[in-house]
Image (cartoon, coloured by chain):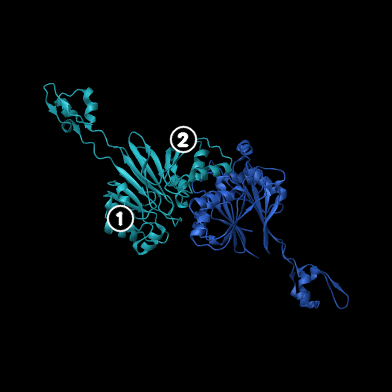
Chain colours: A cyan, B blue
Amino acid sequence: MKEFSVTILGSSAALPYKGRNLTSQLVNYGGSLFLIDCGEGTQMQLMKYRIRFMRINHIFISHLHGDHFYGLIGLVSTFHLLGRREPLHIYGPAMLEEIIRLQLQASLTNLVYPISFHVVNHSAPVQLFEDERIVIGGFPMQHRIPTTGFLFAEKAFPRKINLEATETYGVPYTFFADLKSGADYVTDKGETIANEVLTIDPGQPRSFASCSDTGFFEALPGYINGCDLMYHEATFMNDLAAVAREKMHSTAGDAAKVAELAKAGRLLIGHFSARYENLGLLLDEARRIFPATELAEEGKTYTL
Amino acid sequence: MKEFSVTILGSSAALPYKGRNLTSQLVNYGGSLFLIDCGEGTQMQLMKYRIRFMRINHIFISHLHGDHFYGLIGLVSTFHLLGRREPLHIYGPAMLEEIIRLQLQASLTNLVYPISFHVVNHSAPVQLFEDERIVIGGFPMQHRIPTTGFLFAEKAFPRKINLEATETYGVPYTFFADLKSGADYVTDKGETIANEVLTIDPGQPRSFASCSDTGFFEALPGYINGCDLMYHEATFMNDLAAVAREKMHSTAGDAAKVAELAKAGRLLIGHFSARYENLGLLLDEARRIFPATELAEEGKTYTL
């Protein structure tokens, strides 16, 4: 099974706070690195955790609040200074390209590698990236400015050949591709051998959803239904639910409710307000609704 | 004597490197805080060193290479989130205002405090700020894009009254303002008492110069002549003098030469290339020319 993991680079909302950095998550799928959000200091965090960050080819920016993207121009510049050649794909709101290009222009920088900006449609679920193993999509969230959540979904695996069974029933190698696609096998004598007998269940494809920033809304669980791991912002606790509503953020309880409704496997809460010294209280609030909750801890890698 | 000190917040050139952060220096003059440059992560450094950074009212940006200003938008945003009311003055190249305003616009942020942008003339020495105690000026440097150095110069002090002498010669209090301005006193008997007898030398006013980034050029020492403390970039060592010339940077030896020609009191070298693990070699190179050289160490405060 391919590695599929998420490393938390920043867990603080709005402001950096005593060892808590601004939002960023790194997704590793089979050695390909994807970055979600890039708050100020993200490049330092990538260096601190000794991540081979030149291998990041795709960066997804959820929205244009500074705590989610002010570190992007620094990372783009560092790639340039380190002599990157690989194209970099950046997915986000339309104004992001203007902001990055204006700053490159101010320093008369002609990047030594190409950047492609992909404007994300914030109003409906949309596919952003696909290769032979994984599909990455965006889905709308509800925040004060247009904001996108991201879903990393492994593609369904082909069924695996049961070599013992294929030998028993004399299935030729030439039929293996059909078997992987789910076909039954008909023997020389006209006997039908069910695909399930000749192949092994390859297991369920895995998925990871990232939801930051958003208030709770009815449609959200449907966008990420059945995801194995879900990162969700939990800026406030329930005693500040009114503030959360006003600012279109979530409480730890809101995050847990989304995880429960989405039938998620596990929930990671993050994007903590600087007012909380003791994050255990937020964890308790979420776990009362959704026990399989963990705190998003910086530098820690969560494997699917 | 008023406090007059410089705290180094970042000493790395271009890239952050193992514990070395991007360029920023904090000047404290009598409790007023001034920031010179603001590389990515500067707000984290201000927090780390427990600096009461809301008291920074003036920020000077030398030029628009990212390592000198990518942290400014984050600091501006943090001031906003913390409910700052005091006006903030930012001095720098013309495009800086456009870059900051575009990013505030992208997040629909209406700052709760006013910012005044002051465009710095890069082609000649210019006065940027003045109060009753200090004058801050900019002077041209020679870099790949328009770049300014900054000189913080205490104003000349009025002479101090020598109370013993004024009593001896019967000088009335009403003449003290004239004494402070340098006037001699004529007694009732027509005897002239020299000002030097009646007053005490108040000491020389102090000055701090910040030079980053620049290649060596003949006019530079003249702009900062006699400064007590001088920060100067020393991106490279002499073995890479050709690279320094090409990139319009300085070697440690260049920095020392400027300090010597300017008859500076002390020299701080900083803005070190990430290629140097052992900064002692740069220090040695500078000290061979200008012995009163120190390394700019992050978190360390240098008092004038």
Seen as rendered, the residue at the extreme top is A188
* Chain designation of label 1: A
User: A61 left or right of B256?
Assistant: left
Callout 1 and callout 2 share a chain:
yes
Residue B45: tell me if it is visible: no
Residue B91: tell me if it is visible: yes
Q: Which of A19 and B268 is in front in this view?
A: A19
Q: What residue type is labelled 2?
A: Pro
Above or below for B69 versus A195: below
Q: Which amino acid does label 1 sit on?
A: Ala
Q: Which of A21 and A150 is in front in this view?
A: A150
User: B244 left or right of A9?
Assistant: right
Which circle marks residue A87 in the picture? 2
Is the C-beta separation of discs 1 and 2 under 8 Å?
A: no
Q: Is mark 2 on a helix, strand or loop?
A: loop
Above or below for A271 versus B284: below
In the picture, which quadrant includes the C terminus of chain A? Answer: top left
Q: Is mark 1 on a helix, strand or loop?
A: helix
